[in-house]
Image (cartoon, rainbow, N blue to C red):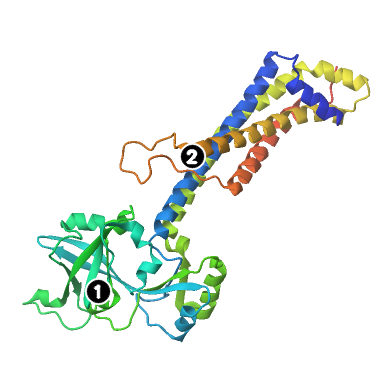
Amino acid sequence: MNLAFHIARRYLFSKKSHNAINIISMVSVFGVAAATIAMVCTLSVFNGFQDLLTGLYKNFEPELKIRAFEGKTFRLNSDFDLIRAHKEVAVFCESLEENALIRYKGSQASALVKGVSDNFSELANMDSLIYAGKFVLEEEGFQFASIGIGLASLLGTGSSFIDPVTLYAPKRTGSLNPLNPASAFKTRRILLTATFGIDQPEYDDRIIIVPLNFARELFEYTDELSSVELKLKKGANLQRVKEDFRQLLGPDFIVEDLKEQKADIYRINRVEKWITYLILCFILLIALFNVIGSLSMLILEKKQDAGILKRLGADHKTIRKVFLYEGVMIAFLGAFSGILLGVLLCLIQQHFGLLKLGSGNFIVGSYPVLVKASDLFFILLTVLAVSLPSVWWPVHYYFKNDELP
């Protein structure tokens, strides 16, 4: 065994040493471990919230969305026939989205009308999103709509109501008659068969889903679309398919996966996550002052022993290594124990949900957590990168003049 490492280990773990310096060394280990635990748990909570949002969005949003680079609408060309027939595409859904005014009796609100093709229920997991009623687009020649639960509540309507809702959209062609302003709007009525909810206001409070032909008639389009939404077959390589479609369609179209569709939300989550991480790094720096203090006290106490080692033949480099190893062991022990305990706490929270969110109307009852191996590796590197300079400095300071008794 390396002599310097053996002596350092004896200094840290000797059963016969219970003086103040050993106690301070253990406190230093606990300080580094506590900061590491905080990093693991905090980053895992942010991962948990991001994973929760991804799960919610996946129920409604497509894996891939294709839209025009310029303008709100586009027409399908022959390239889309190749996409429709692609071996890894399971569902090819056409969509047209526009804003409109929706009215029910005396109530009205602004809504996002989403016209979709008949296979939309194969793309979105609507069965898990329906609060009341049944998701139907067309049946026996009649057209129907499904409305977000928040929007339905605002209008005072629902899936079991007999009266239809009325949609108003500005006419795209023609001139405005100042004597009859209502003539500037295209009006359509439609019955509701279901209310749905995704637990996100941008969906629940705004969206009404209608048949694609209904939306085209309302907004005076012929064969235009806002987007093509795709669901891939199980096991398909999402990134490869996305790049293939980008090359096929060229610069006139944008092909986005789910994270790119919701880029702003994911960006905010990342910014919050890493700002919190930087704050915890500052706390770690404070904890490392304990390491500097305990190592300095150990050097002062053991300087007599270092002199004996020198007279026995140990060179200056070996003696320095003893105290460097001591500090490195404190940092490693704190980092590894902190990561292990942090992962253990996250697993307990994941399975038992001990830490609750509170009494509010939340999607989940307890804090969601998701431990990522990449985060653990990054935390370990950070703790060691910050700890090693704090170990090197006191050793360098006290032994720079090579003065030993």
In x, y percent, where is residue 117? 33, 75
**Residue 124 vertical placement versus 340 (above, below):** below
**Residue 70 vertical placement versus 306 (above, below):** below
Question: Can I make out residue 366 in this image?
Answer: yes
Under mark 2, the amino acid is His
Q: Residue at x 65, y 43 (%)?
A: 381
In x, y percent, where is residue 391? 71, 31
Q: Which residue is mark 2?
A: 351
Label 1: few (<14), some (14–19) or many (≥20) C-alpha neighbours in 10 Å: few
Nearest to the observer: residue 296 or residue 361: 361
Q: Is residue 158 left or right of residue 358?
A: left
Question: Residue 210 is drawn in which quadrant?
Answer: bottom left
In x, y percent, where is residue 170? 20, 74
In x, y percent, where is residue 148? 26, 59
Question: Can I make out residue 281 in this image?
Answer: no
Q: Which residue is mark 1?
A: 139
